[in-house]
């Protein structure tokens, strides 16, 4: 089983990719990224409340709709701190790339507006 922070980081990273490249004009992109990280952790609700349905979801292939939750639990069966650190580093890198891309696009718009390039 992967750690919760690993699931969150992977979900937030995938959501960042989605928001940046597939739906770039979405409102409140950072909120969507946080929601994507939370979505990845939903199957772990079985740890908070031992409901048979939640336990069955957590241990089934259906958990993969939550940003590959089931697959990650199988790949990282030892709760590896290294796996979590790599996932967090990927999230940080993707966030930095997204922010750079956003600021760069904004500076192009400002430059075109300043030089009259929109007319």
Image (cartoon, helix red, strand yellow):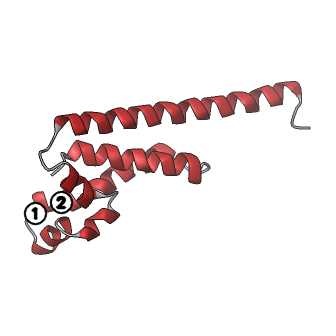
Q: Residue 116: x and y, percent?
A: 89, 30
State whether residue 61 is above or below residue 26: below
Element type at mark 2? helix
Q: Which residue lies at the image location 11% right of the left edge and 45% below the top edge?
A: 78
Which residue matches tag 1?
49
Judge the density around disc 2: few (<14), some (14-19), many (≥20) Cα neighbours within 10 Å. Answer: some
State whether residue 61 is above or below residue 23: below
Q: Which residue lies at the image location 49% right of the left edge and 47% below the top edge?
A: 17
**Can residue 51 be seen?**
yes
**Cα separation between marks 1 and 2:** 6 Å
**Disc ID at residue 14:** none
Which residue matches tag 2?
45
**Can residue 26 be seen?**
no
Q: Which residue lies at the image location 26% right of the left edge and 33% below the top edge?
A: 85
Q: Please count the marks in the image.
A: 2
Judge left or right: residue 46 versus residue 7: left
**Observer-nearest of 94 and 28:** 94
| Labelled pair 1, 2 in contact (Cβ < 8 Å) | yes
Judge left or right: residue 81 versus residue 87: left
Q: Can you name the residue that lies furthest to the right here?
A: 119
Quadrant for the C terminus in the image: top right
Element type at mark 1? loop
Judge the density around disc 1: few (<14), some (14-19), many (≥20) Cα neighbours within 10 Å. Answer: few
**Observer-nearest of 99 and 81:** 81
Q: Which residue lies at the image location 44% right of the left edge and 50% below the top edge?
A: 15
Q: Residue 88: x and y, percent?
A: 31, 35
Could you say which quadrant of the image residue 65 lies in? bottom left
**Observer-nearest of 3 and 36:** 3
Q: Residue 82: x and y, percent?
A: 21, 34
């Amino acid at each position: 089983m992967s750690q919760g922070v690993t699931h969150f980081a992977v979900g937030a990273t995938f959501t960042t990719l989605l928001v940046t490249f597939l739906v770039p004009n979405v409102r409140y992109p950072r909120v969507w990224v946080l929601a994507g990280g939370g979505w990845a952790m939903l199957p772990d609700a079985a740890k908070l409340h031992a409901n048979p349905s939640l336990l069955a979801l957590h241990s089934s292939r259906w958990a993969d709709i939550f940003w590959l939750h089931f697959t990650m639990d199988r790949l990282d069966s030892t709760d590896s701190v290294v796996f979590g650190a790599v996932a967090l580093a990927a999230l940080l890198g993707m966030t930095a790339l997204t922010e750079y891309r956003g600021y760069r696009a904004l500076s192009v718009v400002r430059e075109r507006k300043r030089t009259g390039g929109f007319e």
